[in-house]
Amino acid sequence: MGLVRALRCPKCGKEPGSKVVFRCPSCGSILEVNVEVGHLTPSNLQEILQSRDRSIWRWFDFFPVERRASIVSLGEGSTPLIHATRLGERLNMARLYLKNDTVLPTGSLKDRSNSVGISKAKELGFTTATVMSTGNAAASVAAYAAAAGMESVVMVPLGTAPSKIIQARAYGARVVVVDGDFDNEVAQLYKTAIEEFGWYDCLSSNPYRDEGKKSYAYEMVDQLDGEVPDWVIHPTAGGTGIYATWKGFHEFRSLGWIQKLPRLVASQSEAAAPITYALMKGLADIEPEVAGPTVAESIQVGNPVSLGWRALAALRESNGTAVALSDEEILEAQSLTARLAGIFAEPAAATSVAAAKTLRATGVIGSEELVVCNLTGHGLKQPESIRFDNKEFVPIAPTLEALREQLQRAETGE
Ligand SMILES: Cc1ncc(COP(=O)(O)O)c(C=O)c1O
Ligand SMILES: [Zn+2]
């Protein structure tokens, strides 16, 4: 069973004593949940590894859910960790691995967190889950709420393209379009509505939800037969992924199940890189910025105000780094990952490969080091990111001669 300690403020240490208050009443910080794992032994690890459950729930003891009956799972977890030899050759990296989270149930890493978040909502007796999002989080919350038999409400700002929210709508979410700006009016209404209607808040500031991403650490250790990567590179917006991964590796080390910790890298778009800049400037906290336009839409966050500092601390403690990438570098990495490794990742996800390329080229990462790039979202989430020439699809007559001509044209780039 997951032995859950109280929600606790990581900044001032207060324990408000409620299971459903996510913010510290004294200092305003997001609270954190810590699960007691000290009683686990190597034989527990053996049992887990032999379990037939391939979802993240084989690590039940590490999650803040008290009863197995509360679990809402779509089989998320144990995503492939692929030794990308062709891509590695191109980047001069002998041990480049890709953690393929594009195959998660709704196509992004958010399923790791929402499986845990919605299971906890069920355990706490909520009937409606809500999130404010234009992308991966909305689809994931909607899917898990559907599986749990809960309602879901997704709030988006006016101007959001239907293609961005259609997946959430398909799972039955109530999509509410608000005439206002995301960080101000929409955020304000979102907060007020949660208080008014008693909905379950699925934003990244939900401390239960965040714990799900610790599964990255557990799965990597399992899939690498106990070896710990030298580097883990994670596409970063709010910073929950980096922080949770760090926490997961720490738990394993505290249990003596691993001896070392990886160095962590946050990969960001240069249009939205507050964590990278805070790290480079040696700041203790994030300086919020207004995010600019970028192809890496899913990580276009300029103000990770609630969690950024925890990610920053994790990067420093791990002796890691952060990289801000241009759209050109991101799209190149997306293309290399698809063509040399066979994985179609969305641009935000491909930032991890772009960062690996940069860090290898500058000698920060050595050619023999074990590097894991997390591919956190499917390319089909944003198919318009693939550029092509309409001429490629001009129909030909159904003859071999026309086909030969067409193939020749493609070769010569005519
Ligand atoms: C595709 C993708 N990658 C990575 C992230 C990382 O977010 P975080 O830094 O909050 O873990 C997100 C979340 O918005 C995402 O949608
Ligand atoms: Zn506090």
Image (tube, rainbow, N blue to C red):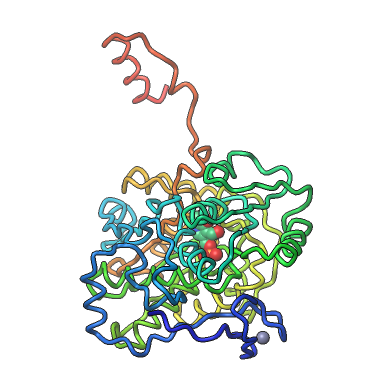
The residue located at (37%, 51%) in the rendering is: 103
> How many discs mark residues in the rendered view?
0
The reply to whether residue 323 is in sight is no
Up/down of 95 relative to 33, above or below = above
Q: In the picture shown, does residue 347 fall above or below 94? A: above
Q: Which residue is pictured at 62% across the width and 86% down the height?
A: 17
| Residue 316 in sight | yes
| The quadrant where residue 68 appears | bottom left
Q: Quadrant of the N terminus?
A: bottom left
Residue 99: where, in percent of width, then height? 35, 59
Dividing the picture into quadrants, the one containing residue 83 is: bottom left
Residue 396 vertical placement versus 201 (above, below): above
Residue 45 in percent (x, y) is at 26, 79
At 39% from the left and 68% from the top, the residue drawn is 216
Q: Residue at x 72, y 55 (%)?
A: 182
Near-viewer residue (218 or 59): 59
Residue 137 location (% of width, % of height): 55, 56
Expressed as whole percent of the image width and height from the top left, the position of residue 64 reads 47, 76
- 97 or 355: nearer the eye? 97
Rendered-image quadrant of the C terminus: top left
Tell which of 228 and 3 is nearer to you. Answer: 3
Q: In the picture, residue 66 is in which quadrant? A: bottom left
